[in-house]
Amino acid sequence: MAIAQNQTITSSLGRWMLYAMAALLICVGACFLWVSSQLINARFDNFDAKFYEQQLMRVNGVFEQNNLAFEASLVDYAHWDDTQQFVLGNNPNHINEDYTPEALDNIQVNGLIITDLNGKLVTPALVKQAGVLVPMSEDLWASLQPVLPSLMSPDQTTVTSKIVWHNNVGILISGVAITNSFKNAPTSGYLFFIRILDEPLLNGLRALTLVPFQLVPSQATAQPTSLVIQQDNNGNKQWLATQTLTGLAAKTEVQGGTHLKAERELTFTLLLLSVAGLTLVSLIGNYWIVHFKVLNRLHLFSTLADQYRQEPHSLIRWPLKGHDELDNLAQSLNEFIAEVEIRHNDLRHIAHHDSLTGIGNRRLLQTKLDINMQQHARTPDFTSTLLLIDLDGFKLFNDGLGHAAGDYILKLIAQRMASLVRVDDTVVRLGGDEFAILLENTTPDSAHSFAEQLLKHIAKSFEYEGHKLNLHASIGIASLKYGLSKEDVIRNADLAMYEAKRRGKNQVVAFKINFLDIVSRRMQLEQALREALNEQELAIWFQPIIDAQKGCVIGLEALSRWRLSSEFIPPNEFISIAEASGMITKLGRQVFDKVGAALQELRIDYPQLQCNVNLSLRQFRDSDLTKDIIECIEKYHLPPCALHLELTESMIAESETEILPTMQSLVGHGFKFHLDDFGTGYSSLERLKNLPFDTLKIDRSFVVPLGQDDHVMVKNIINIGRELGMNLIAEGVETEVEVHKLLQLGCHQIQGYYFARPMPLDELKIWLATTHPQHLAAHKSSQLSQHQ
């Protein structure tokens, strides 16, 4: 009777599970197929759109380069003594001698027009036909004549271009004022060049760009506008991509079909077959589970019960899957060993948890990783993700407020982490201010979202003994994958965390395989940098600092540049390698030597010229910095005022007491210090009052908001500098609006791309020789008048 009842129960559970799982798998498979097909279709369409956008960008780039060369040729001919004398009637043979067909072919000019200042033709409008210049036809002249007045500008440097459509062919016409070769004579007339954008010319551009584009009429726009649309042509998808040429009445057009049609069809076919196959396999598996695994489960319960009778102290957990009869049996059996489980967990907690914070420790993480690795090997669909968290700037709090404060902060951060995770997730403290979280059954995307939320939670302010404090963290993410050891997973998360530190801290970075390449690249660069320093291959570039009020150059900033083969290595990359490897001291000595040599040469013509040199914290630790700098100025016979030294705000906050004696020694020898990137670190007003800084450099992050009329931070920094009697320099200034706002706020010393980019010494000499104070002053006055 009992056996029959058990068979009935088994049969009932089996049918219910079979029907439910079959329906569920079919529904899930259908939903997955529909969603996946939509996403794949969208991704292919996006790829096609990007493909046609890139083709248009390549075509328009070639057009712009050709137009610039065309306009440059026009300026060369217009700013020429021969052309001016011809307009004035003193050089009648100018056309025949200087506008030969061969010369026009070289610059791709099909015709020309020369007028006096009133727009009257000096010579008939000419066009090249059959290799000779002949008068322009009346219908072509009728098309071009109306646009000539709009191309006439008395400004000798202004070139104006337009496209005129004649018989469905675009004609590019550009005009500029005529003057002498030195550009110091009044405008005497106007020169216009004509380029016919016919099929031979367009075919040349098509061959150059490898894009089968068309040039069609359009409304002229100040900025290029692009449009990529998909059209349905009798069931076939076609793409039409257009982009206007800047300021010209024409646009380029590219048409074509889907770029990856075969791949798209293959992808959909494989997706359909995969979903159908997985659904079928899952149904067969469920059938096998229902008919065989239920009885096996009952057998397992019986076996475990016998085992517990024989070994009452063994730790046995009977599986619970719901609330059916088997689960009731399992629950009853589990209650027998509850007390043993509790005591076992107590001992395990002590062995696997951190005594300070109460969360897990490194041993617990290793154990969990082993378990998850085994689970992943058994079930490839099982996913888990490791987060490695390192607190940013914790050393400042620990050293500044004491170890008791550090312990308080560590416990607080541990509590905040534990409050966000789920029951199955694992939070551990690896040591010091480094934590880890192992997220169970979590994809990398979900882990990234959780990490972003965790950053915000950690960053919430808190109070300690009357101090209101904030703390940030950097997080690296790595997934458990087949074939990786737990050491590999921890290493991957560690590399991702250090990448987050490198990008500026307070960030989340997921591990990428190229991070291993980064480590390899760093090793190769370290060896190459060592050789480059031995051969003194590093170059020094200089960026001028301008007094925008007086219109003069007041100084330079020296910037290290390194070209390895054909690649320019970013300064922040090789300088960080130099600091980590101890080569920064040698690099610093070479910088001082090259800057000293450059200043000695430049100060012959510019006696008051100064140069700023950046210092590293490692230079204070590894070398006799004062001795190195004094030897440099003595070697090149420079006064201390010629060399200014720059420190970043973060350096001061990190090691103020360590570098202060050297700073005071250098100030005693007559050197001046600049505080770089002011406002981005941890400086306080008290620190600024006590440290021997002469100048504050306003970071570009505060200059950029000036373009949106947000000047609160810059104004406050300027006020602080004035109150402390310090000089002010604004960095990274790139627009007229920023210059104008800075002048209004009282900051006159400006450094940035708006006036000059960093340049080698040879280019700097040319720049200094050709950029006179009168030019800068006129430039500044022009800016102010435009804004008034």
Image (tube, helix red, strand yellow):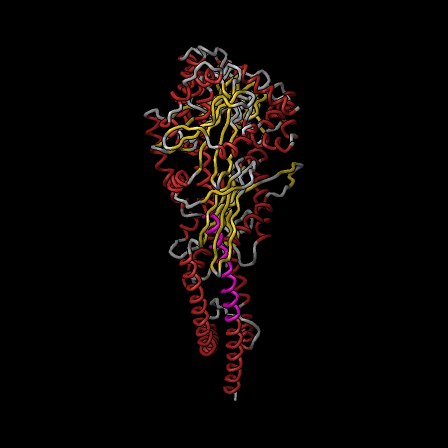
Q: Give the magenta part as a residue range.
A: 25-52
Circle count: 0
Q: Which residue appears farthest toward the bottom when viewing the image?
A: 1
Between 608 and 738, the residue placed more toward the observer is 738
The quadrant of the image that shows the C terminus is: top right
Q: Residue at x 53, y 86 (%)?
A: 5
Between 339 and 291, the residue placed more toward the observer is 291
Between 208 and 23, the residue placed more toward the observer is 208
Q: Is residue 164 visible?
A: yes
Q: Which residue appears farthest toward the front when viewing the image?
A: 138
748 relative to 510 in the view: left or right: right
Taking 753 as reference, is 223 above or below it?
below
Residue 692 coordinates in the image, percent (x, y): 56, 20
Q: Can residue 350 be seen in this view?
A: no
Q: Which residue is drawn at 48% across and 61% down?
A: 235
Residue 304 coordinates in the image, percent (x, y): 46, 73
Reply yes or no: does residue 44 show up in magenta: yes
Taking 496 as reference, is 573 above or below it?
above
Q: Quadrant of residue 699?
A: top right
Q: Residue at x 52, y 77 (%)?
A: 19
Considering the whole magenta stretch, tell me its main secondary structure: helix
Reply yes or no: does residue 314 show up in magenta: no
Residue 764 coordinates in the image, percent (x, y): 44, 20
Q: Quadrant of residue 328?
A: bottom right
Residue 534 coordinates in the image, percent (x, y): 33, 26
Between 588 and 305, the residue placed more toward the observer is 588
